[in-house]
Amino acid sequence: MKRVRVAVADGDRDQLRRSTGRLAKMEGIDIVASTMSGAELIKCISCGCADVIVTELTLMGVDGIAVLETMQAMRGAVPKAIVVSNMNSDWIVNTAVGLGASYYMIKPVDIALVYSRIRMLTRDVWEELPETDSDVRKSTGEILRRMGISPSMKGYHCLEEAVVLRNEDDTRYRHLTRQLYPKIAERGGVSPECVERAIRTAIASAWDKGALRRFAAETEDAMLLRVKPTAGNMIEKLSVLTKRYASGLN
């Protein structure tokens, strides 16, 4: 098995030390940079030293948004980017994702979840991750954002994971509380109860903002226009819509 080269950046010295220390102990991870400086992170990226960067937006000198802008302007291959930040406004999240961040995670976050996302982004290293994961995640993420569920919400990532698992084995992960939630919790380093709560919170937020009904109107979904979906309804709907996206029927 190859090892994944990870660069970690955070303007908080103590947080940087904790994150770097815990990630360094994870299987298959090589920490190639640990810095508080945005300029140092860009230097690491420019020399091709990292496969993945895990960065806060608040850095010394050059902030994380500027780092992402620099990456976007680079030619050739660039590392995958995971943003782990205290900033949770929709504008900041959408800006970071628009500049190429694969995941946006709000502090405090369990480092096991960060590790899980690193594995997903470097699936060629981990044989057990299906080759189709990336396409499923991309399509699911696009749909969730259209529904008004932001990557800054824990429920976004739980719903995304639910669709991936259903895509892997729809029969095995049919039952939510006995099968699906425990598996998502295992991958994310949280409890099944946290998974269920995060999904319900995300759905309620999108419904209360009217974003789900706007999506329903755009897609001519009469049922979604009238009734707030349960967690099971939402996962089922996302699974169907993701398959349509993959077939070019969106």
Image: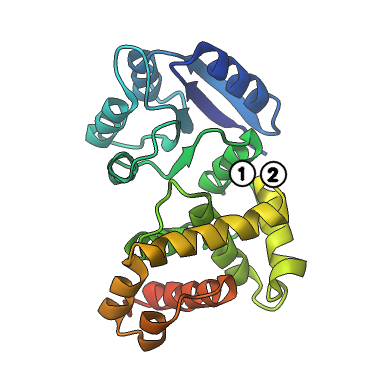
The outermost residue toward the bottom is 222
Q: Residues within 10 Å of mark 2 (few under 14, many from 20)?
A: some
Amino acid on which the number 1 mark rests in the picture: Ser
- Decide if residue 219 is on the left or right side of residue 54: left
Q: Which mark is residue 37?
A: none
Could one spot residue 135 in this view of the protein?
no
Q: Which of 47/207 is in front?
A: 207
Q: Is residue 48 above or below residue 136?
A: above
Residue nearer the viewer, 60 or 53: 60
Local secondary structure at mark 1: helix
Residue with the mark numbered 1: 116
| Residue 238 against residue 164 in the figure, above or below | below
Please name the amino acid that badge 2 sits on.
Gly
Q: Earlier in the sequence, mark 1 or mark 2?
A: 1
Location of mark 2 (residue): 189
Q: Is residue 103 left or right of residue 133?
A: left
Look at 38% across and 24% down and name the residue there: 45
Q: Is residue 89 left or right of residue 181?
A: left
Q: Position of residue 169 (x, y in %)?
A: 66, 72
Which residue is depicted at the point 67% across and 33% down? 28
Query: Which residue ends up furthest to the left in the rendered image?
Result: 73
Mark 2 element type: loop
- The quarter of the displayed image where residue 103 is located: top left
User: Could you say which is closer to the camera, residue 118 or residue 1?
Assistant: 118
Q: Nearer the viewer, mark 1 or mark 2?
A: 2
Residue 91 lies, in percent from the top left, at: 27, 43
Residue found at the far right of this picture: 178
Q: Residue 180 placed where, x, y %?
A: 69, 66
| Image-based side of 214 in relation to 7, left or right | left
Circles 1 and 2 in contact, beta carbons < 8 Å = yes
Q: Residue at x 40, y 67 (%)?
A: 207
Q: Is residue 103 above or below residue 17?
A: below
